[in-house]
Image (cartoon, rainbow, N blue to C red):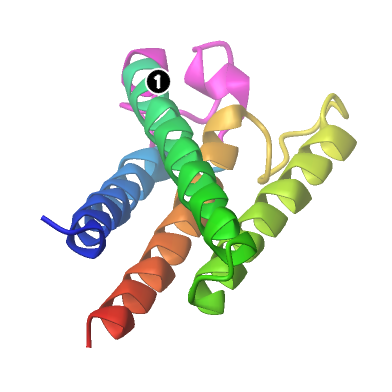
């Protein structure tokens, strides 16, 4: 199996896994910590979105996002090495990774800025909402990466 086919399969797994994670984390989107852990009001609609639901889902897809981060990092490092060696590479791939890094950086700055302000922010409060947004962005980046890989195969 060549490298392009392997990458195609990996990024398809990342894409579909990110979509699944987004769907599974939607029930806790925008809920405050007290709603998930049972100390708040207004859990009638999201009766199943409690800590027993969130903890395994959050852990599983948190590790999934971490795995994607390392795969992106390894592949972008490999592309940079190839660029230094003056081999032909697709700049579209580097742009894709650059945009992913930029989104991650912006999200991190927003989390740092809004963390601990006493409100339930949609971007960060609690971490499950941020994970949903991160999974949506990961889905978009993985879809973009798959399109780049498909163009290379033609």
Magenta span: predominant SS is loop
Q: Residues within 10 Å of mark 1 (few under 14, many from 20)?
A: few
Q: Quadrant of the C terminus?
A: bottom left
What x and y, as percent, mark residue 96? Answer: 55, 68
Instruction: In the displayed orientation, state which residue is furthest to the bottom.
Output: 154
Is 52 one of the magenta-colored residues? Answer: yes
Check if residue 48 falls in the magenta segment. Answer: yes
Say which of 27 and 11 sits in front: 11
Magenta range? 31-54
Q: Which residue is mark 1?
A: 59
Residue 60 in picture, x, y percent from top left: 34, 25
- Residue found at x 40% / y 58%: 139
Residue 13's x, y, as percent?
A: 23, 50
Q: Indicate the position of residue 91 as horizontal and vertical percent values.
A: 56, 77
Q: Quadrant of residue 5?
A: bottom left
Q: Is residue 142 above or below residue 30?
A: below
């Amino acid at each position: 199996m060549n490298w392009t086919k392997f990458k195609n399969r990996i990024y398809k797994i990342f894409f579909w896994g990110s979509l699944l994670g987004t769907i599974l984390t939607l029930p806790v989107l925008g809920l405050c910590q007290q709603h998930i852990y049972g100390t708040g009001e207004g859990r009638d609609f999201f009766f199943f979105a409690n800590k027993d639901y969130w903890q395994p889902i959050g852990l599983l897809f948190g590790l999934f996002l971490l795995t994607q981060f390392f795969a992106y990092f390894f592949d972008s490092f490999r592309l940079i090495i190839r660029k230094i060696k003056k081999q032909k590479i697709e700049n579209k791939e580097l742009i894709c990774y650059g945009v992913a890094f930029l989104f991650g950086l912006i999200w991190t700055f927003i989390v740092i800025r809004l963390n601990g302000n006493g409100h339930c922010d949609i971007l960060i409060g609690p971490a499950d909402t941020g994970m949903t947004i991160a999974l949506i962005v990961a889905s978009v980046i993985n879809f973009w990466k798959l399109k780049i890989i498909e163009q290379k195969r033609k």
